[in-house]
Every structure is written in structure tokens, then in C-alpha cells.
Amino acid sequence: MSRTPSNMVALGTKAPEFYLKDMKSGTESFSFSDLKGEKGTLILFICNHCPFVLHVIEEVVMIANDYRVQGLGVVAISSNDVVNYPQDSPELMTEFAFENNFEFPYLYDETQEVAKAYHAACTPDFFLYDSQDKLVYRGQLDDSRPGNGIHLSGNDLRGAIDSVIYNRTMNPNQKPSIGCNIKWK
């Protein structure tokens, strides 16, 4: 299990636009503009098989459910190479979304262009944008990792989202997420 840190993209960076197919619905495609929230937008790069994602997915879904009703857009994207990692195939993305009760789109980045545009490096990788589509947080969910004995809390990400939703000062100490590297073609 590799331990790849996220890239700490410059805060204030504008959210790249995309147009990707939603594997949860299987029929719809969405852009960033379609899915952005009134107060802000959380883009998370995940996949179906990464032990780091599997470790946090329940907390991630709770966070999405807690904040979507408060004006946060939430979007999950999988960019892994499905030829060499068939467990991340679009069909299995659909299963994964339903098994984990996603109430948000799970988009397939087949060309990997979106992951490159966002400078995503690992799964999970979290990017939080404000209502002006500017990056205000890129980092970890919390200090919990598979096997380290720290319970999931989502504190880091929840604190960042609270700052966006309630116009609070953002914590300047942002730690990179750690996870499996994106499986590039």
C-alpha cells in the first residue's frame, strides 16, 4: 500500500471546469458549474479499491450528507486507469456508489485530464472551493489512516467546510492527504 501525499496546490487557484459522466446515474454527465454549491464545492478524488478510501468512505458520506443541505456541492471523481486496475471500472463505480449510499455524483475521468487539471495525486484527495470557485482547502480528512489506531473524525475537512459555510477564518495549517497514488495510464 503506497503512501502518496496530495499536492498542496496554491490556495486561491480557480476550480478547473470539467464535463464527466456520472456513474451513479449511468446516463447523465455533469460539469463543475452544474454541481457547484451555493456556499462552496468539495471535489474528492477517490476510487473503489484503495484501502485509504475504504477506511474513510463512511465518514466522507456523512460529511457530504451533513453539508449538502447547507449549500455545499459535493462531487466524487475516479481517475484511475481501469485497464490495469479493473476493480475501478465504471460498472464497479456504480456498485460502489450504491453500496456506500452516495447522494452525490460519482464521475468517471476516463482520460485522466481532470485529475491532471486539479493536480490530484492520491486517493482520497480533497479540494474545497469557496462560493467564488477559489481553492480554500486542499488536504486531509483527519489524522486517521488504515492501521494507525486513530479514530475517524473528519475534523480537518469539517473545520474547513465550516469556515466556508459560516464565513469563519480558515485554519492556515493544512496537512496533505495521504493515500494510494492515482493509477496513471
Image: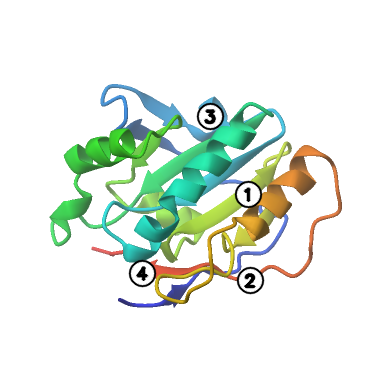
N-term mark: 4 or 1: 1
N-term mark: 1 or 3: 3
16 on left or right of 146: right
Please provide percent x and percent y for residue 109.
33, 46
Residue visible at 85% across and 42% down in the picture: 167
Residues 18 and 130: in front is 130
Q: Which residue is mark 2?
A: 175
User: What amino acid is found at the position of numbered circle 1 in the picture?
Assistant: Leu
User: What amino acid is found at the position of numbered circle 2 in the picture?
Assistant: Lys
Q: Which residue is mark 3?
A: 35
107 on left or right of 18: left
Give SS at disc 4: strand
- CB atoms of marks 3 and 2 within 8 Å: no
164 on left or right of 76: right
N-term mark: 3 or 2: 3
Q: Which residue is mark 1?
A: 128
N-term mark: 2 or 1: 1
Q: Which residue is mark 4?
A: 181
N-term mark: 2 or 4: 2
In the rendered structure, find residue 83 and report the number of the disc placed on it: none
User: What amino acid is found at the position of numbered circle 4 in the picture?
Assistant: Asn
N-term mark: 4 or 3: 3
- CB atoms of marks 4 and 1 within 8 Å: no
Residue visible at 52% across and 26% down in the picture: 34
Please provide percent x and percent y for residue 125.
49, 59
> How far is mark 3 from mark 2, CA to CA?
26 Å
Report whether residue 157 is seen.
yes
> How far is mark 2 from mark 4, CA to CA?
17 Å
- CB atoms of marks 1 and 3 within 8 Å: no
Please provide percent x and percent y for residue 5.
49, 74
User: What amino acid is found at the position of numbered circle 3 in the picture?
Assistant: Leu
Give SS at disc 2: loop
